Amino acid sequence: MNNNLIEVRDLVKHFEVSGGLFSRTKKVIKAVDGIDFDIKTGETLGLVGQSGCGKTTTARALCLLDPKTSGTVNFFNPDRQKMESIDNIDEDGKRTFRRNMQMIFQDPYESLNPRWTIKDIIKEPLDIHNIGALNDREEAVIEILRTVGLTPPENYLARYPHEISGGQRQRVSIARTLIMKPKFVICDEPTSMLDVSIRISIMDLMLNLAKDLDVSYLYITHDLAVARYMCNRIAVMFNGKIVEIAETEELLKNPIHPYTKRLISSIPIPDPSYIREKYQINYDELEEIILKNPDKKMIDVGNEHFVASHDTKDYLFES
Amino acid sequence: MSNILEVKNLTMYYETIDGNVDAVKNISFNVKAGESFGIVGESGCGKTSVAMSLLQLQAENGKISNGSILFDGIELVGKSENDLRKIRWDGISIVFQGAMNAWNPVVKVGEQIREAMREHSPESTKLQNTEKINELFSMVGLDSSVADRFPHELSGGMKQRAIIALALSCDPKLVIADEPTTALDVVIQDQILSEIKKVQDLLGLSLIYISHDIAVIAEMTDKIAVMYAGSIVEMGPTSEVFKSPQHSYTQALLDSTPSIKGEKKKLRSLEGEPPSLIDKIDGCTFAPRCPDRETKCNPSQHMQLIEVSPEHFVDICSIGKESK
Amino acid sequence: MENINEKEIAKSLRREAIKKNWRLFKQSRLGMVGLYIVFFFFLLTILQPILFITGMWDESTYNPVVGYVDQTQDFLIVECPKEFPTEKYQKRSDCPGRNEVNVKTLFYADGEVGETIQLNLQPAPPSRRHILGTDSLGRDVFSQIMEGSQVAFLLGILSATLGVGISTILGTIAAFFGGKIDAYLMRQSDLVLMLPTLPLLFIISAFAELKIWHLAVVLGLIGGLGGTVITIKSQALQVKVKPFVDSARITGGSQMKILFSHVLPNVAPIALLFMVFSVTGAIASESVLSFLGLLNIEMSWGLMIYLAQVEGYIFSGLKFWWLILPAGLSVTFLTGGFYLVGRGLDEVFNPRLRKR
């Protein structure tokens, strides 16, 4: 049985930029240029790429912050037990979608409203969707504060964001995100602005919650090492396209696309005795595979491992 | 090999509205000629303050209350602004965090480098300077045409390389690099790091590399100092500190760094957060978070570096602890 | 039990925050000077009713509007010579003498040189009874200053509140909804910005009798629909793209709810700043209008100077200084004071401006 939670097909997001003061033509920036991926229930898919590759744009299109240019996004509606497309659903379906989809942002300082108390911030989703009796809502806030490790919860309810630290703020973000027990959470580099010594605790918290609440994550990061720690599968994105997607260890052990190989070989290793090999860009392996599968956009090389066939040679390695 | 830099008992604080904040507490370290010295630590540990104070470039409310900084035998603490200006860029140059944005947007890149050269070696001719710029650019992997471009025409990676060229333009003996590649993509970072290494070998430069990225420090440095809340907790040759870290904080840092190579090991995290420096802490600054606090710790003990093996120093609290 | 703890902690944190903000404000020397000035005038504002209520001041004597003094005295009309000394007068300041009046300074009475004429002793210079003297009608100047202070505060705060209230809502709406609404509001702002305020007020005063309340509303509207909208809109735009607004949108909050509960509260600090600055404009406008006699108002600082000018005392140099200087200096200092408070507040809200 297909236990896909999200199915994305040919997602495209273009931005129009005017060509200049007197230019009539508009330049089109293809931030996301036709990507496909699925996320199963309870799995964490990593979206890895460098800045400008389109990963944040993808996230924003998925949660309807910015409208997509084209493509389909299907999600599994738990109330109706079937896959529905975001484009043509009724109000009810849309509300279900919003209840089950959340996002954790990168900047712990800007993702909480500085004028709201912690209690109100975490309670807001419940108020928007009118879940539970009013008295129970505060109980739920206290409960989730305990779950994310902010104890004693009562100390935090009346505080303002600037009165707690960065790591605590990120926990509040997580609490707010998970209070409605959504099925799908997009995480946009949630630990990159935190101190190194506390990153793991936040990531472990997210992993535990994923297990306990059966949540799927789309984990966006530029750091493959972090993706390895967090994700079951990783999709590598470059210039608006997914170039490779596979299970984590498979991708790291057996990368096929030259970009992936280049990426992996560029990452510094925290071991002074390890000598990194410089990767010489080499398209031979990929071209062989493309030849055998001439018509496919994403080629299945077995073991749930897919490689993109489109041409990236021209713009791959500028500096 | 002689020491190009000797820092002894450097202590620095900032005057703020909430009181005096001790940023750097009694730091001592040496950098040999041609050596690459890394300072690693998290936010608030004082590493940037150390970098700035080496060139007396700290903020207006930053004051050095104690200590000496000997550069090539010259004492820098207490020197006049005029004298310091001669040493800056000529003897010691610095690549700041976010240096990419340090370019003047309305002046061509080459001209800005020329400006620095004119300031420090007024006798050299325009031709000599141009040749030098071309040489530097080829060293960092830039085409010589970049000199005629404006900063906004260059990509992030190119700007950063140009900054490195700028830092090398007056033949410094020591270059301080404060998180020079933080905002860059990992592929470009890799290129730039190898350029830095190449240049260092070529010119025999000494390098102080400051970062919170353990992996980069591992690859770029010969010797490192681990800083926490204003003090050095461990210092020694990079390979040795990584192989057998003595201090609990160093161990925790290493154990919390995910890697793409090797077995997928269980990582651990420290509880709590790095302290706000406003709270004055007597004795060990790391004690509140130290996982070994229960077993062998005297939190009120004054922090002090003890040599445990040749060139390998660790805070006195870790003496007698087994390495993991 | 839990609730008490929560409130205790909240209260103590709040107290600390207020103390910190106060310390920041204290650091700004400009802000503190401004605050002292404003506080001084505020004291004046409440001093007058206190004096009246406690009976320290007799209403009939000290009322700034109707405390007329009717005291006449016989004066001999003389003509002061052009050159000194003459046989009657040694120096210029001897003429006119104590019971004499120079024919040239007679405005309201006709008389020939040599005649005796009955004139008021007013305006009288500062004396023990009237510490700032009296005006031409015998009304106590100090009382008038205090009355003017009340007017200034009232007018300033009313028009500032109205103006900033309007511009905050409009600016936030423009930023939030964009499109045609934004375009319209920006054009409206441009239009209002182009209008010269004072000439507009002159025209209005020609059609309608302007009382102080009317002036407050007009100034509030002009201020509210004008350039401040643009600045607040830019601030609101910055708030709109912050992740916490995105978060609310993702969760499914309605537009209006997000506008009022997320964006507006974050625009408030800068709106407060504008409010303080716009008080200065309001007070200054009032004094100009009163000075030109266009306001239907019983007493204000501008009116004091207007009366002094209309009755010709301005041209006598500093001889009748108490009719001009207190009022003029009051306007200058109070507007300056509010401006400095705004500068001080700016340092609190804008961490980059702080010295540390």
Image (spheres, helix red, strand yellow):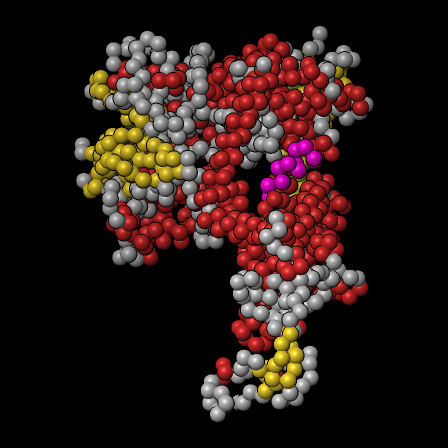
Q: Which of C194 and C35 is in front in this view?
A: C35
Where's residue A122, x and y in %? 62, 22
> Could you tell me which residue is drawn at 21 percent across and 41 percent down?
B75
Quadrant location, the N terminus of chain A: top right
C142 to the left or right of B241:
right
Residue B3 belongs to magenta span: no
> Could you tell me which residue is drawn at 70 percent across and 43 percent down?
C169
Image height of B54 relative to C221, above or below: above
User: Looking at the magenta stretch, what is its main secondary structure?
Assistant: helix
Where's residue C11, x and y in %? 55, 27
> How many labels sit on residues?
0
User: From which residue to which does the magenta span run?
Assistant: C259-270
> Could you tell me which residue is drawn at 35 percent across and 40 percent down?
B62
Q: In which quarter of the image is residue A105?
A: top right
Q: Nearer the viewer, residue C289 or B22?
A: C289
Residue C128 can be seen, yes or no: yes
Q: Which of A287 and C196 is in front in this view?
A: C196
Residue C260 belongs to magenta span: yes
Image height of C269 relative to A138, above or below: below
Q: In which quarter of the image is residue A64?
A: top right
B103 to the left or right of A239:
left
Where's residue A255, x and y in %? 51, 19
Where's residue B308, x and y in %? 22, 17
